[in-house]
Every structure is written in C-alpha cells, then in structure tokens.
Amino acid sequence: MTTTTDFLPAAETITMFSTSWCGYCNRLKKQLDKDGIGYTEVNIEEVEGTAELVEALNGGNQTVPTVLFPDGSSATNPSVIEVKSRLGL
C-alpha cells in the first residue's frame, strides 16, 4: 500500500499530487517556479496507488493539487502563500 512516507519531500520542498489536465495544478506550478520553490510532481493518473493516497488525504475525494509537506502534513489546493508559510520561507 502506498503511504505518505513514500513521498515525503526534502526540507523546503513539497510533493504535489496532480493530473495533467488540472488547471489549479498548472497555476500552482507556475507560482512555485516563479518563487523558486522546489517540488516533485506526482501524476495520480500515472503512478500506481497515488490516487488512493490522495483520496485518503481528502476524505474520499481525488482532489488535486494535493500538496505534501516535509513534516507529513498536507493541504488541498493551497495558495503559494500558504505553501511558503508552511515551509517557513
């Protein structure tokens, strides 16, 4: 079974669960790139077990972007301001 520990990011970076067609995901990626925040993108339609992981993090919904932080916490569709704050940047 896939767990969040399988995808924990390094300090000051995030793991972003997304899909190729998600407009909110594309917007967040552009904002992260602009602000120089590192991220690993995981497409839940391509990586086995990750759609179920996102469902578990979101009360049964496959909502993206779902972001995983180094401390193991997550956020659904966060703003870049929230990401920076939670990373201490």
Image (spheres, grey):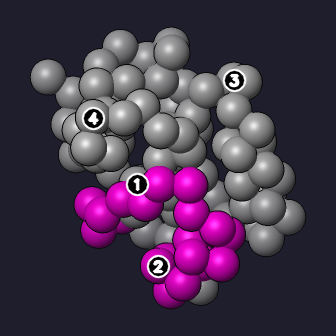
Give me the C-alpha separation between circle 4 and circle 1.
Answer: 17 Å
Instruction: Tell me if label 2 and label 4 are in contact, CB under 8 Å.
Output: no
Q: Is residue 58 left or right of residue 29?
A: left
- Mark 2: which amino acid? Arg
Q: Name the residue carrying label 3.
A: 20
User: Which region of the structure is painted magenta?
Assistant: 70-88
Q: Secondary structure at mark 4?
A: loop
Instruction: Tell me, for residue 86, which label it has, or none.
Output: 2
Q: Position of residue 3 (x, y in %)?
A: 20, 37
Q: Residues within 10 Å of mark 3 (few under 14, many from 20)?
A: few
Neighbourhood count class around disc 4 (C-alpha, 10 Å): few under 14, some 14–19, many 20 upward:
few
| Image point (36%, 59%), residue name | 74
Neighbourhood count class around disc 2 (C-alpha, 10 Å): few under 14, some 14–19, many 20 upward: some
Q: Alpha-carbon distance for marks 2 and 1?
A: 11 Å
Disc 1 designates what residue? Answer: 68
Q: Residue at x 47, y 24 (%)?
A: 44
Q: Earlier in the sequence, mark 2 or mark 4?
A: 4
